[in-house]
């Protein structure tokens, strides 16, 4: 059997599903748009940062070329010549012009190399009063490998990718050849100078806690310091997809896994400065980029839960308002189906349900009126039928008593006269016929009395009932215990007749069907009601048996009880006897009008 689902449950479920779907779609679109906006903003931010850093790096090396150009124009640099007796280190600042000192004193350079290719010798010019450990100075072969990358006499930049542990402070060299003196001038650029451009640890620069910009050489090693590892230059190898694409000449911003194996958004491009084969990258961790999105998602979930709860509450209240009237209508329809037409539903809404309620009230009112009319018509028909029966019984009783009874009495007198005149067998026969005639007259008198007891009309219903009980006791072995109290003179003749017939029918049913030995009868009356109880100790009766002959008599009793505006209740169980209880109102003007 399919489970019953009420309209309220359907409405609540519909509203909840509608709310959840609406909230889900709205939340998904909001989350998707927010995620796209955040990613787009981050892509643009990293792209802008990468472009800006690239410009700064290219400008930085362009200025380094200018510095070297100015230096080689300075006489203090051109005045150097090779002398085997001269010290390898030159730290006397008086050897340089003011202009050269201004360039060399900047924090960009760690010194200056003078390389003589003919003798394969090096002079290292330092402005520090401290002599530098020669182990940290580039060898002639190292300088030669840098110089041979670009053998023309133009100013160029070389990336030193054969690093040693001792050479950790320089990464790029600016060089040029001076034809007049036949030597190379090489400026080593400090890594710190490049890091000042690339490395930022400022939370307000838009890179957050995980964003960084860094450089990678064609050997896949870092050329600037990593935010996550201070000793990363020429130490950390970066072979990510961004680096590979950048060396192929591709410029883009994509999502990859970086050198730390962490998912990042990476913007990459190639450095276009002459002599450098580097790529520049600006990256930020994916998780940090999506932190605002995650917060927004959590807020959406929180708000969605609250809105869903409100949806459930509102849908329950709305469905309750809609179904309350329907439930009332359903209950009222059930009452009408049971025959109770005294229903009137309050109209609380001015809509289709209100119209339906109004129509139902009108229908119930019309059914009540029709039912009342039908009931009155049925009562009138029943009253007419029963009253007709009583009238016919009265007529038959009079006919039997006044007509047939008187004729039989006359006939009895003649037979008695005949018996007195005749002798012998004829007299005997006449006497026997006279006795038989006496019995017939008695039977006719009894039949006349059953049809309409004279005692009922002359001495009242209480005496008529007692007389009836005496007749049954005389004609059978039944013992009847009768108790009658109260004054029944206020009953109308018809009420007396109806009451007597109910008692008569109850006793007849006991005599015919109950097989009882004792009958208890009680008739009492108070100021408002008459109570009749008739019970026996017989075999009882099963009223579910439709073939029970006593049902016609019971129906007659109920019909008369209805005419009295009373209530007839019969209690009977197999083997436990039967009890008939009748109550009807006394001195009720309405009742009197119905049966008068």
Image (cartoon, rainbow, N blue to C red):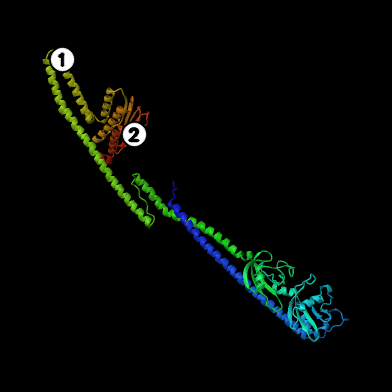
Which residue is pictured at 51% across the width and 56% down the height?
309
The correct choice, above or below, for 89 with respect to 520 in the image is below
Q: Which quadrant would residue 398 be assigned to in this image?
A: top left
For residue 350, side relative to residue 310 (left or right)? left
Using a 10 Å C-alpha cutoff, classify the residue at mark 1 as few (fewer than 14 neighbours), some (14 to 19) or many (20 or more): some
User: Vertical placement of 332 versus 488: above or below?
Assistant: below
User: Which quarter shows the C terminus?
Assistant: top left
Residue 428's label in the rendered image is: 1
Residue 57: give its label.
Answer: none
Q: In the rendered image, which quarter is residue 56 located in?
A: bottom right
Q: Where is residue 263 in the image (x, y as percent from the top left)?
A: 64, 64
For the question of whether residue 282 can be seen, the reply is no
Counting from the top left corner in percent of width and height, residue 179 is at: 78, 85
Element marked by disc 1: helix
Where residue 260 sits: x, y (%)?
69, 64
What residue sits right under mark 2 in the picture?
545
Farthest residue, direction top = 424
Q: Quadrant of residue 339?
A: top left
Whether residue 478 sits left or right of residue 184 in the image: it is left
Where disc 2 sits, the SS reads loop
Name which of mark 1 and mark 2 comes first in the sequence.
Answer: 1
Circle 1 or circle 2, nearest the eye = 2
Give the answer, above or below, for where 306 lies relative to 540.
below
């Amino acid at each position: 059997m399919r489970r019953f689902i009420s309209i309220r449950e359907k409405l609540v479920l519909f509203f909840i599903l509608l709310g959840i779907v609406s909230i889900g779609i709205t939340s998904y679109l909001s989350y998707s748009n927010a995620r796209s906006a955040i990613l787009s903003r981050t892509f643009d931010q990293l792209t802008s940062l990468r472009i800006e850093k690239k410009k700064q790096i290219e400008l930085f090396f362009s200025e380094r070329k200018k510095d070297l150009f100015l230096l080689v124009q300075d006489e203090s640099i051109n005045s150097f010549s090779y002398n085997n007796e001269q010290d390898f280190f030159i730290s006397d600042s008086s050897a340089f012009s003011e202009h050269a000192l201004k360039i060399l004193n900047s924090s960009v350079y760690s010194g200056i190399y003078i390389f003589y290719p003919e003798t394969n010798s090096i002079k290292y010019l330092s402005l520090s009063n401290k002599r530098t450990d020669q182990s940290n100075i580039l060898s002639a072969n190292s300088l030669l490998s840098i110089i041979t990358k670009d053998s023309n006499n133009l100013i160029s930049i070389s990336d030193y990718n054969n690093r040693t542990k001792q050479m950790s402070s320089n990464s790029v060299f600016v060089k040029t050849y001076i034809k007049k003196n036949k030597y190379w001038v090489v400026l080593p650029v400090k890594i710190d100078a490049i890091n000042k451009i690339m490395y930022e640890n400022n939370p307000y620069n838009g890179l957050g806690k995980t964003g960084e910009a860094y450089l990678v050489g064609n050997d896949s090693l870092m050329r600037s310091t990593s935010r996550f590892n201070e000793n990363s230059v020429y130490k950390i190898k970066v072979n990510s997809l961004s680096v590979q694409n950048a060396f192929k000449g591709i410029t883009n911003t994509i999502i990859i896994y970086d050198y730390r194996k962490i998912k990042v958004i990476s913007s990459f491009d190639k450095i276009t400065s002459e002599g450098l084969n580097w790529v520049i990258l600006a990256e930020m961790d994916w998780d940090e980029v999506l932190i605002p999105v995650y917060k927004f998602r959590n807020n959406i979930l929180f708000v969605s839960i609250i809105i869903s709860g409100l949806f459930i509450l509102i849908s329950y209240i709305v469905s309750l308002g809609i179904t309350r009237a329907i439930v009332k209508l359903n209950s009222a329809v059930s009452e009408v189906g049971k025959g109770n037409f005294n229903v009137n539903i309050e109209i609380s809404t001015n809509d289709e349900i209100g119209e339906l309620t109004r129509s139902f009230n009108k229908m119930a009112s019309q059914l009540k009126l029709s039912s009342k009319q039908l009931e009155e018509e049925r009562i009138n028909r029943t009253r007419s039928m029963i009253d007709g029966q009583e009238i016919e019984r009265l007529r038959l009783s009079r006919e039997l008593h006044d007509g047939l009874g008187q004729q039989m009495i006359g006939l009895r007198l003649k037979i008695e006269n005949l018996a007195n005149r005749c002798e012998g067998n004829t007299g005997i026969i006449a006497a026997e016929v006279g006795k038989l005639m006496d019995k017939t007259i008695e039977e006719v008198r009894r039949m006349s009395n059953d049809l309409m007891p004279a005692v009922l009309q002359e001495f009242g219903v209480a005496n008529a009932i007692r007389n009836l009980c005496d007749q049954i006791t005389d004609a059978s072995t039944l013992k009847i215990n009768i108790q009658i109290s109260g004054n029944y003179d206020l009953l109308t003749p018809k009420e007396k007749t109806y009451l007597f017939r109910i008692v008569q029918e109850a006793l007849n049913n006991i005599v015919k069907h109950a097989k009882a030995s004792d009958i208890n009868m009680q008739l009492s009356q108070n100021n408002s009601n008459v109570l009749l109880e008739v019970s026996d100790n017989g075999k009882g009766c099963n009223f579910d048996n439709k073939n029970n002959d006593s049902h016609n008599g019971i129906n007659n009793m109920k019909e008369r009880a209805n005419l009295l505006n009373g209530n007839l209740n019969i209690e009977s169980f197999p083997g436990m006897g039967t009890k008939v209880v009748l109550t009807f109102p006394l001195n009720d003007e309405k009742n009197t009008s119905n049966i008068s």
